[in-house]
């Protein structure tokens, strides 16, 4: 009766053992999936960073355009006439004509200024999105690291499969040598059967 109970206990332990192995395999597959997602996120971030590297030239170009526009505004300032004995009407006409040309050029560039503002705003938005993606990727990496540590602890605390299987094989052989009479197994001390000490160890 005691031997049958021990066999039943071993069967229960075997079931628990199989459940633990199944759970470990499930956790491992989940980890693999998360790791693949993490790698894809890294690839996407790398592409975005490469795009951002190209924005430097575009920003420099925009800054140059703004500087040129400021120069145009400065040139378009109305000249101040100096006092004197007489007024050169031709000189005044030339200055006014130049002033009108500069103003025409300035207003003609209004559309360029608006386009420049839109491009700068777009660049700022893309930069903010890149920062957000970088933060999300960092959070994902930290989460995967925690999952790895959990799996390590689970693997460190798993059952010793080889020892467990050896004990099952010994008990099976002992029952076989006893002619199927499990009541003789606990009392047998030789002839290939397990002794009391070994039975207690298995228990």
Image (cartoon, rainbow, N blue to C red):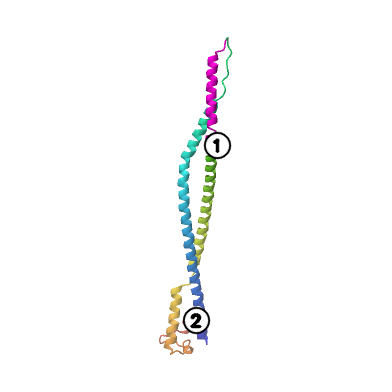
Which is nearer the eye, 37 or 14? 37
Residue at 47% over, 40% down = 56
Which is nearer the eye, 73 or 49? 73
Residue at 50% over, 67% down = 154
* Magenta residue check for 158: no
Residue at 53% over, 21% down = 97
Q: Position of residue 55 (x, y in %)?
A: 48, 42
Q: Is residue 86 above or below residue 98?
A: above
Question: What label does residue 200 carry, if any?
Answer: 2
Write the start and end of the magenta stretch as one range.
Answer: 86-114
Q: Position of residue 10 (x, y in %)?
A: 50, 80
Label 2 residue SS:
helix
Q: Residue furthest left?
A: 191
**Residue 189 visible in the picture:** no
**Residue 200 visible in the picture:** yes
Q: Which residue is mark 1?
A: 114
Mark 2: give few (<14), some (14-19) or many (20+) Cα within 10 Å: few
Precedes in sequence: disc 2 or disc 1: 1
Q: Position of residue 26 (x, y in %)?
A: 49, 67
Label 1 residue SS:
helix
Work out how far the residue at label 2 is from the one at label 1, CA to CA, in angstroms.
88 Å
Which is nearer the eye, 149 or 100? 100
Q: Is residue 92 above or below residue 105?
A: above
């Amino acid at each position: 009766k005691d031997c049958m109970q021990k066999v039943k206990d071993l069967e229960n332990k075997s079931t628990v053992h199989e459940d633990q192995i199944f759970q470990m395999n499930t956790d491992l597959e989940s980890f693999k999936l998360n790791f693949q997602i993490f790698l894809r996120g890294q690839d996407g971030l790398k592409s975005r960073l490469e795009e951002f590297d190209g924005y430097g030239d575009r920003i420099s170009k925009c800054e140059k355009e703004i500087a040129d526009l400021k120069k145009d505004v400065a040139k378009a300032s109305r000249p101040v006439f100096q006092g004197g004995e007489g007024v050169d009407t031709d000189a005044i006409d030339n200055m006014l004509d130049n002033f009108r040309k500069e103003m025409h050029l300035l207003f003609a560039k209004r559309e360029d200024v608006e386009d420049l503002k839109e491009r700068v705003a777009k660049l700022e938005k893309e930069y903010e999105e890149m920062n957000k993606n970088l933060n999300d990727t960092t959070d994902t990496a930290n989460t995967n690291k925690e999952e790895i540590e959990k799996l390590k602890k689970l693997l460190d605390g798993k059952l010793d499969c080889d020892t467990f299987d050896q004990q099952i094989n010994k008990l099976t052989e002992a029952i076989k040598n006893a002619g199927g009479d499990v009541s003789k197994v606990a009392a047998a001390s030789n002839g290939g059967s397990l002794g009391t000490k070994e039975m207690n160890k298995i228990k």
